[in-house]
Amino acid sequence: PAGHTQDGGEDTSFRWQCVEQPIGKLLFRRFLEGTPGLAAAGALWAELEAFDQCEEAERAEVANKLRGRFFTPGGAEHCSFLSSAATAPPTG
């Protein structure tokens, strides 16, 4: 589905600007990494992209490391802004 558009018809959605457009992605990631309180979000984003590229055999181990680092209170880069539903281990 198309994202949000403005009068000119260009897509102004977050996904288009900060994920799909390389320069927008780079600038937003630099913003996250350089802003106190948001650096962990930038690191999480980078690690999730790396997770998407890892081999199937490595996924369980990598996922556990991600949970410990970002989703666990007291973790190295705990992302407390994430809901408990977003950080819950998968079921099934």
Image: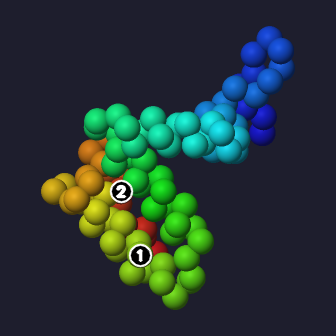
Give how far across and how far down residue 81 sits, in percent.
32, 41
Mark nearer the N terminus (2 vs 1)? 1
Residue 87 vertical placement versus 8 (above, below): below
Give the residue at mark 1: 62
Residue 48 vertical placement versus 4 (above, below): below
Q: For the point 41% across and 55% down, which residue is it?
A: 44
Front-most of residues 39 and 1: 39
Q: Is residue 17 left or right of residue 27?
A: right
* Farthest-out residue, top: 7
Q: Residues within 10 Å of mark 1 (few under 14, many from 20)?
A: some
Indicate the secondary structure of the residue bearing disc 1: helix
Q: Is residue 86 left or right of residue 57?
A: left
Distance of mark 2 from mark 1, alpha carbons?
Answer: 15 Å
What amino acid is at disc 2?
Answer: Thr
Q: Is residue 82 visible?
A: no
Q: Is residue 30 left or right of residue 16?
A: left
Q: Quadrant of residue 88?
A: bottom left
Front-most of residues 84 and 42: 42
* Farthest-out residue, left: 74
Q: For the point 59% across and 71% down, which residue is it?
A: 53
Q: For the point 43% across and 80% down, which residue is it?
A: 60
How is the protein colored in the picture? rainbow
Give how far across and how far down residue 12 sits, in percent.
70, 26
Give the residue at mark 2: 87
Front-most of residues 3 and 92: 3
